[in-house]
Amino acid sequence: MKDRPQKTLIVEEQQALTAYLDGLLQEIALDEAEPEPIAAKVAPGPRLVTQPKLVSVPQVAPPVPAATLAPRQAMPPDWAQGAFQCLLFRLAGLPLSVPLIKLNGIMEMPEKITPMPGHSPLFMGLVNRHGRKVKVVDITQLVMPRDRIPERSPPRNLILIDDARWGLACDRVEETLTVTAEQVRWRSSQGKRPWLAGTMIQHLCAILDVDYLASSLEDGNWG
Amino acid sequence: MAKESQSASATHATQYVTFRLAEETYAINVMQVQEVLRVAEIAPVPGAPHYVLGIINLRGNVVTVIDARRRMGLMDKESDDSSRVVIIEVTGQVIGILVDSVAEVIELAEKDVDPAPNVGNDESSKYIQGVASREGELTIVVDLNKLLTDDEWAEVASL
C-alpha cells in the first residue's frame, strides 16, 4: 500500500475539521434562527396593520425594541450559570470539551479492555476500575460523519461520565478552560447533533451534552 | 424472611468452568459440562452453519462440535495443544464447543455477576449472562441455554 504524503494528509485533516466545525456553527445558527417570534416577522410600521393575515390578531404588537427582535438564543443549562470550567480533549483530531461538573474522572487508557462479543463496534468493552465496570465507548462515529473520520492513533485517555459508568475514549486530554455562559452559543436538544450542548466560539470547540450522551448510550441509541 | 431468602439467593455460589477465548476468560455453569476433551479428528459436515466445525465420535455417539470463536464473532485461530472441546448438555442435547483452553473451576455468587451491558448489542449476544470481576480481571459468564437460538439448536440436532 502506498503511503500518502504526510503534508497532504495534514491538509486533508485540517480541511475536514474546518468543514466540520463550520457545520457545527452553521447548525447552531440555523437552530437559533428557526422559531422566530411572531413580532420578528412583522416589520414595524402602520402598513402591516392593514394586511389580511393580521386582521384576526386581536392586538397588534407595538413597535418592538431591536433587542427583542434578535434570533432566539437557546438558554444555557443549569450547570452553566455564570462562569464554569470545561476540559478540552481531542477525538480523532476534533477539539471537544466536557463541563468539569459533569466529569467523574480521567484515566490513562488501560492496557486491558475486556471486549464483549456481539456488541456494537463503538463499544470497546469493559474496564475494571476499583471493582466497578466502566463501559468504554468510542463516540467518534456518533459525533463525526463517518466519511470525515481521519486516520488516527490509538486513544490515550478515558473520560469518565455518568457516575463513571461510561468511559469516552479520546486521543488525549488537553487543558481546562474557564468560560462564561455568554461565550458559548447554546443550542437546544433538537437537531442533527443532539449530543451538542453548545460551542465555545472563541475556541471553536464543541461542548458535549454529557447527560444526553449518557442516556442515549444507555438506551442503546448508537447512531 | 423474604429478605433473608433474597440475601441467601444473592450469596448462593454456583460453580463455573472457565475457559479462554482470544485472551479473555469465559465461564459456563459446571452442571452443564459433561467432560473436556483434547481436540481429535473433527469430521466436517457439508452445508452446516459456519460456526459448526463438524462432528466427532464420542464413544459411539455422534456429537456436533461448534467453534466458540466463530459463534462469538471472534477471529479464527488454529487449534493447538491447549485447545479443548468442552462437551456440554443443553436441554437434553449434547454438543461440543471448541475453546482455546480450559482454565479452572470457580465459584461465583449471584451478587458477583453483573448483568451484561445493554450497549448496541445484537440478538446473537444474548448468550452473555453477565460479567464478574475476579482478582482484578473480568470474567464473561455465558448462558449456554442461549448460545444458540431455538432454530439453531434444531439445525444442529439435525446434522
Image (cartoon, coloured by chain):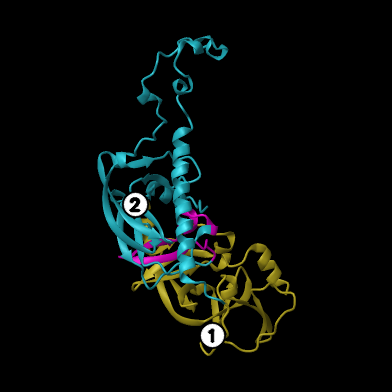
Callout 2 amino acid: Val
Residue for badge 2: A98
Density class for disc 2 (Cα within 10 Å; few <14, some 14-19, many ≥20) is: many
Q: Is residue A164 visible?
A: no
Report the chain holding disc 2.
A
Callout 1 amino acid: Ser
Q: Give the magenta range.
A: A118-147
- Colour-to-chain, yellow: B
Q: Per the image, is B53 magenta?
A: no
Q: Spatial distance from mark 1 to mark 2, Cα to Cα?
A: 46 Å
Drawing shade for chain A: cyan
Instruction: Identify the residue at horizontal 45%, vertical 24% (top origin).
Output: A37
Viewer-side residue, A31 vs A99:
A31
Residue for badge 1: B83
- What secondary structure is found at the residue carrying circle 1? loop
Residue B40 quadrant: bottom right
Residue B112 quadrant: bottom left
Density class for disc 1 (Cα within 10 Å; few <14, some 14-19, many ≥20) is: many
